[in-house]
Image (tube, rainbow, N blue to C red):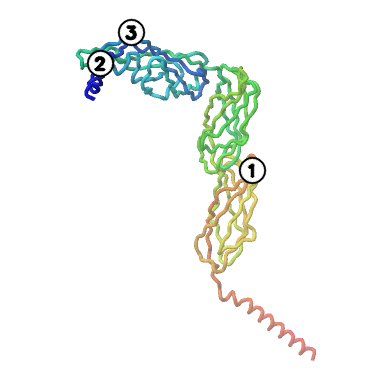
Amino acid sequence: MKYYRLIIVFLVLWLCCSMPVMGVTTYLGGSPQMSAAISGVNEFTPGQDATINVIVQNSGVDRLKFVMTGTIARDDLPTTAKMVMVGLSAGNAPVIVKNDLQSVGEIKSQAMVTVAIATRILSNATEGEYQIPLTIRYTYLASSDQDASDILQSDYQQITETFPITIKIKPQVKIEVLEAVPENLNVGSEGYLNLKIKNAGSEDGRKATVKIIRNGASPIIPIDSSVFIGDFLHNGTVTCRYKVAISSDAEKQTYPVDIVVVYENRDGDVVTSASDTLGIPVGGKISFTITSETVQVVQGSQSVIQVEYQNIGTSIAYNAQARLSVVEPFKSTDDTAYLGDLKPGKTATARYQMSADDAAVVKDYTLGTEVRYRDALDNSQVSDTIIVPVQVQPKPASNGFMQVLPALGIITLICISAGYYVLVMRKKK
């Protein structure tokens, strides 16, 4: 047993002495080699929100590799790009870049990453190729010196490189509004919008349709929103007419509306042009006012009153009819009147038959009235309620003698008749 243990110890010692010394692999003489290129589509249209996908690749190669015994292992390779930042600038191109520098981490040798950069192509961009600068900033291990058996000194350097990225702006139909004429556009009514537009772009639009689109919550609401114009050639002009409605909660002011052209381009694709926003003036709602004096009604009497209405709007009120809302202590057997067509600024008089109760309090009252009319597109409209001032007058003071005078006359007549009768009868006797 004693010899057996000695043999085991001897074998272990022999194995330890025969094991090779472990070495550290070291790379020298290399650095990152960065490059950039657009991935996918690089053609865009004016006014487009575009995402430009850029591939960033590290093609660095380690030129020298050796193994040293008893050295400290390096944490990084000289060909690894660390803390990589990627950013795009517009340069002289008609582009708005929406992203700042983006961090993409580290890119090892022969590796690549894709960076998505949000942009917008300006609506006035012209056809052609543009180069936009792409900036890549990174840090890499430039050198690593082992000054002692347990000390490793590393030198990192920061590099900034710029690469040109080429994009293309495709030709497109570009809208230029020459005229925008509103026709009977008033609050709460319908009217027309007449447009004259020009194709200021470099593309001939085939089978084109001009569309107007509601701009957000704008009170201008298209009813007929599309007009087919056929071929819309470069520098050509067309006129379009649209029926639109104006919301009743709008005010007298200017509101936006968008316009686009949908057409077939030279490649046979159906595309939509960049939109153009127009400001369209909207007139106020047709309204009326009372220009007559305060109406006077006597207690317990019935009379015909006159109320004068004036159109203070900006459009004609066709086939206008006025209605008086009568409440206690008044009554009416005729509360509507025809006013006819009222042009802006014109007046018309309505006559109503109205009476006041005997118990009506002598004071000032107000009654409501409204006007129903037709607008320029023959739509029925109703005005806001207008106030009519009414004053109740007391009954005329009564005279006692005048009240008994008829009775005295009758008695006198009876007396005269009786005397005449008696006189005639006596003569006959």
Mark 1 and mark 2: Cα distance apart in space: 112 Å
Q: Nearer the viewer, residue 332 or 122?
A: 122
Q: Which residue extends farthest bottom?
A: 429
Q: Is residue 10 left or right of residue 171?
A: left
- Above/below status of 394 relative to 199: below
Q: Which residue is mark 1?
A: 379
Callout 1 crowding tier (Cα within 10 Å): few <14, some 14–19, many ≥20: few
Callout 3 crowding tier (Cα within 10 Å): few <14, some 14–19, many ≥20: few
Occupied quadrant, residue 157 = top left
- Above/below status of 427 relative to 79: below
Disc 1 residue type?
A: Asn
Q: Which residue is mark 3?
A: 64
Viewer-side label of 3, 2: 2
Viewer-side label of 1, 2: 2
**Circle 1 SS class:** loop
CB under 8 Å between discs 3 and 2: no
Q: Name the N-terminal-most of marks 3 and 2.
A: 2
Q: Nearer the viewer, residue 197 or 360?
A: 197
Q: Which residue extends farthest left?
A: 148
Callout 2 crowding tier (Cα within 10 Å): few <14, some 14–19, many ≥20: few
Q: Quadrant of the C terminus?
A: bottom right
Q: Which residue is mark 2?
A: 14
Specify the label residue 16 is tagged with: none
Occupied quadrant, residue 285 = top right
